[in-house]
Image (spheres, rainbow, N blue to C red):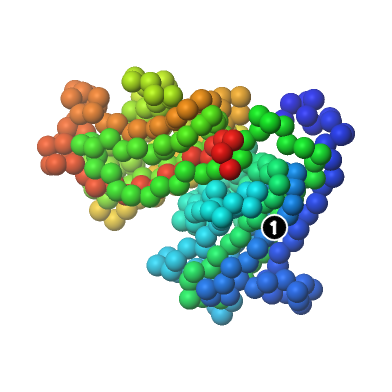
Amino acid sequence: MNTWQELSNTQRGRSRLIPSTWPYDKYPQAPELDAGSTITLIDQDGPGVVSCLHISNYFTKQTFAPLPLDAPALRLRVWYDGRSEPAIDMPLMDFLADIQGESAYFSNLYFSKVKQSHNFRLPLPFRQHIKIQIENPSPFNMIGYSEVQWEQVEAIPEQCGYLRADFRAGVMRVPQEPATLWDLRGPGAVAAHWLQFESDDPLCPGGELLCEGNQEIYLDGDFDPSLEYLGTEDLYGFSWGFKEVQSDFYVAILKRQELPGGGARIALLRSRGEDRIGFQQTCRLVLNYQHDATCAINPRVRQAQERGGLLAPYRSCAYYYTLDV
């Protein structure tokens, strides 16, 4: 959240807004996000800061229906300062914290999902150049629109990093195997993060077993956790499991979906302000259930261990700033 000094500063620079619309007659020159195509949201020399991305829902032009769940997801890529490899490359909806396009409506410091649209407010500073593109790898022609606001500034301070995202998707085995959810290089600072995990098993009603693991954050080669949260719900600002979909200014339970086998799918988001996680060399987050496997008050964890563990698909993302382009 901006301080009063930042909000009242009139020497910030000049604001710009770039609309991208498909395929309305009002903007016949705008690119269309047809099957297999890539469109550019911004391709701009710096120095500057992208301050807001406004991205609508996307629909298939033929039926005005959402993209089928089994279709390849729209993908977002961000390049800084003319580098050949993107600094961010991940599914567009996941980038917006609308995980797999199924998050509930929520409002948060840097992210919001409102009816038919999304707003992303983590700043993206760039010194020389920025390019942001959306790719449609699906076989469907898509319709939607976006607006990119960026601020033209005289210079980016030396200590300001570039926004990057560590996005991962895989399957963990609970509680047998610790899972690494982030592995970042610094110096840097984590500004936001989210996690979705699930298990369709009667041992996980409402995500109860899933919440038990410790979230251990290791900084700069520390042998013991530098930050240790005694449950996933605690890392995301809640307590005693995942009771209902809800959000406040910093944290949100984005999903609490019951699955047909008696388990659940849970998704959570945390935006950080003054409590950003700073590190100088490395930042690694491990989800570890070993402390709970022998705990007398967690019979579900012990039962899962006796059965050889439960397979739990997950998706995870950490948004962080680093000086590495």
Is residue 253 in sight in this rendering?
Answer: no
| Quarter containing the N terminus | top right
x then y, percent, for residue 283: 44, 30
- 137 sits to left or right of 215: right
Check disc 1 and report the residue beneath it: 42
Residue 194 visible in rendering: yes
Q: Amino acid at mark 1?
A: Ile
Residue 25 screen position, x and y as percent: 76, 77
Task: Please give the name of the residue rendered at 84% of the width and 30% of the height, measured from the top-left corner.
Answer: 8
Based on the displayed image, in which of its 4 quarters is residue 232 positioned?
Answer: top left
Where in the figure is residue 163, as x and y percent of width and height?
A: 59, 41
Element type where label 1 sits in the image: strand
User: Height in image: 211 above or below 34?
Assistant: above
Where on the picture, by quarter, is residue 239? Answer: top left
At x 14%, y 41%, the residue is 308
- The structure residue drawn at horizontal position 40% and vertical position 27%, both measured from the top left corner, is 217
Residue appearing at x 28%, y 35% in the figure = 178
